[in-house]
Image (cartoon, helix red, strand yellow):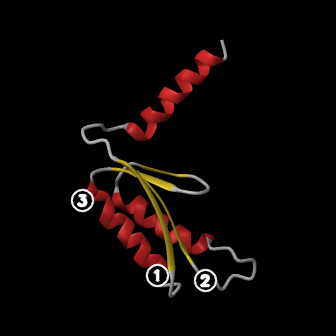
Amino acid sequence: MLFAFSVAPSTTSSDDGSVSAVVAEAIKVVRDSGLPHRTDSMFTTIEGEWDEVMPVIKEACEVVGRHSPRVSLVLKADLRPGFTGQLDAKVQRVEAHLSELEL
């Protein structure tokens, strides 16, 4: 199963409004989990089972909550039990279709 999430503080002390330092702390939680993951400019996607992933997302929110009295969480899940390696496989399937369209 894939879980894409974005967590950020609702407040920041940064003059330019950046929340990147706090978001980096949340991403460190994901990396320390040992679960397959990928981070891009908007979301971090983690692959695993419910009971593996949800505590990681909760901890990431708690880390952000240490910096702000209010935390924003956006969560999207692709619940497909029995499939693994989808973090890369889904992208590879789309790329294969794109290459067929370019012929």
Which amino acid, mark 3?
Asp
Q: Quadrant of the C terminus?
A: top right
Residue occupying the point 31% across, 38% down: 84
Q: Secondary structure at mark 2?
A: loop
Q: Residues within 10 Å of mark 3 (few under 14, many from 20)?
A: few
Q: Quadrant of residue 20?
A: bottom right
Residue 22 x, y percent position in the rendering: 55, 74
Cβ atoms under marks 2 and 3 closer than 8 Å = no
Among the two numbered marks 2 and 1 on one chain, the one whose residue lies closer to the N terminus: 2
Amino acid under label 2?
Answer: Thr
Can you give x and y, in whole percent of width and height, for residue 74 in the image? 49, 64
Count of numbered circles in the view: 3
Q: Earlier in the sequence, mark 2 or mark 3?
A: 2
| Relative to 100, 82 lies left or right | left
- Give the SS element for disc 1: helix
Q: Residue furthest top?
A: 103
* Image disc number at residue 11: 2
Mark seen at residue 51: 3
The circle drawn on residue 65 is: 1
Judged left or right of residue 96, residue 35 is left
- Quadrant housing residue 9: bottom right
Q: Residue at x 69, y 82 (%)?
A: 14
Residue found at the very far right of the displayed protein:
16
